[in-house]
Amino acid sequence: MALNTRSAEDRERPSLRVAMQVFAYRNYRLLWLSSAVSMLGMNAQQIIRGMLAWDLTGNFTMSAFLVLSFGLPMGLFSLLGGALADRFEKRNLILLSQAASVCIAAVTGILVLTDLINFWLLFAIGLIQGSFVSIGMPSRTPLMIDTVPEQQRLSAVALSMMPMTAMRAIGPALGGLVAGFVGFEWGYFGISFCYLLSVATVLLVPTGIGQADRDLSSDSTSRSNQNLFGSIGSGLGFVFTNAGIRRLVLMMMIIGAIGMPLQTQFPGFVESELMPANSNWQFWAGAMVAIGGLGGLIGSILVARLTQSNRKPMIQWIAGIIGSLSIASIWIFSSFGFVGVIMPIFISGGAMTAFMGVNQAMMMDEAPPEYRGRVMSLFMFSMAFLSLSAAPMGRIADVISAATLFGILGLLMAALLVGIGLSSRAKTFGIEAVKSPRNGPARDLISTTPAELTDR
């Protein structure tokens, strides 16, 4: 009997082994694989788009302005995408988004190959693709949550971040290699193939996942009588009346507006401030993003282990401060060249990924099933600040240097996060109450039957 008691206690402690049990579910595995290949293409595309913009303009401001083309539709349409995710089949919305990305990447590659590409055409392509991404992305994480039992949803959210962070390490490196040694056009053709693999994987996922929970929700009747704008309004009303989600959205917007846009300066930063003339800066720019992605991969693994902890708000707060200070330290260490910034980039990648992973996990945990798409769309909406502030930051970098910009904004982020954490000390340092699953006590997945695994 004592042995059984110790075993139960072990299962309650933060454990990566327990978190990894979400991969016992077929549909979660398929969606995770789809996310992995999609993120490989997206991260390779981000670095190749930035390199191509720098190659066309040689200007920080214009290169950062290109980010606006992808992020502006996310700001405009992500709330719509969340409302659609809560009303329609999430799997089909993901398919639409990924299929459109296949075509867009292939067409871009053809334009580069035929030497018809220019900066403004690249900008227009970004607007189109950003619109499709904003429609499909709010569906992915909520759908992945629906494929696992409720007691495993925090692990499901945390591990859903792993493809994003892993491919931040692999995608930019591959993109830099292809762009530097083969050409931009072949990079885009490879990106198109990644999205095609994502489509093929999602096609294996059945429709109707999570529909029973949504039909039983208290919001199901009112949702059926609302138009899309009414659905968006009710989602915003839910968020604004929920103090926990409000706090998480505010912290995410700080990172989205100040921290994330700094990555758009990496290509120009490497070429103009770190590497000697006539070097293969495209490769080293990809390597810099990959170093941050490698740190992010480690951060995502740590988050997966800690999703069962009742100290998640404090973990998130500390991770955000560490990441911000690491970004600020680039100002000092850039004087040592590329080697000098390796550790700050690595640490900031891991810390910021941990921050975002815990943030997203807590947001999804706070939201009932009928609101998860709309809450996830606010997570994406905060990312749209990346595009809105990237161009002004690029202009500042042209004037004061990118390294100085990293230092100033890193310190600003740290100060803001410290202020938020100390202003709500009970939330930051308190112990979270353990929530009981709505469908009864949590079960060990080891006892789950093969039939139940197949159903999910």
Image (cartoon, rainbow, N blue to C red):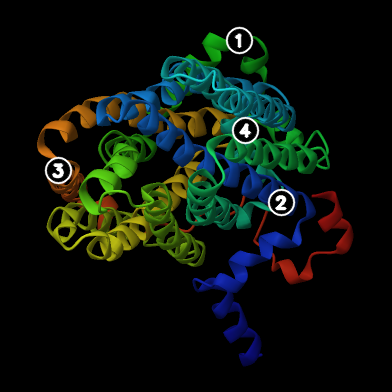
Real-space CA distance between mark 4 and mark 1, rounded to the nearest whole angstrom = 19 Å
Q: Work out how far the residue at label 1 is from the one at label 3, CA to CA, in angstroms.
A: 41 Å
Callout 4–callout 1 Cβ contact below 8 Å:
no
Q: In this view, does 190 lie to the left or right of 211?
A: left
Observer-nearest of 394 and 320:
394
Residue 84 seen from this side: yes
Q: How far apart are marks 2 and 1 (CA)?
A: 31 Å
Other-residue count near label 2 (Cα within 10 Å), few / some / many at <14 / 14–19 / ≥20? many
Label 4 amino acid?
Answer: Ser
Residue 392 lies, in percent from the top left, at 22, 25
| In this rendering, position of residue 378 left or right of residue 157 | left
Residue 99 numbered tag: none
Q: Quadrant of the N terminus?
A: bottom right
- The numbered mark at residue 28 is 2
Under circle 2, the secondary element is helix
Instruction: Single out the mark in the foreground, 4 or 1.
Output: 4
Q: Mark 1 points at which residue?
A: 226
Looking at this view, is 322 or 260 the one in front?
A: 260
Dot 4 or dot 1, earlier in sequence = 4
Residue lying at the far right of the rendered structure: 451
Q: Which residue is drawn at 46% across and 32% down?
A: 380
Q: Which residue lies furthest to the bottom in this view?
A: 2
Counting residues from the start of the chain, the first of labels 3 and 4 encountered is 4
> Does label 1 or label 3 sit earlier along the sequence?
1
In this figure, which residue is indicated by the disc labeled 3? 412
Q: Which residue is under mark 4?
A: 139
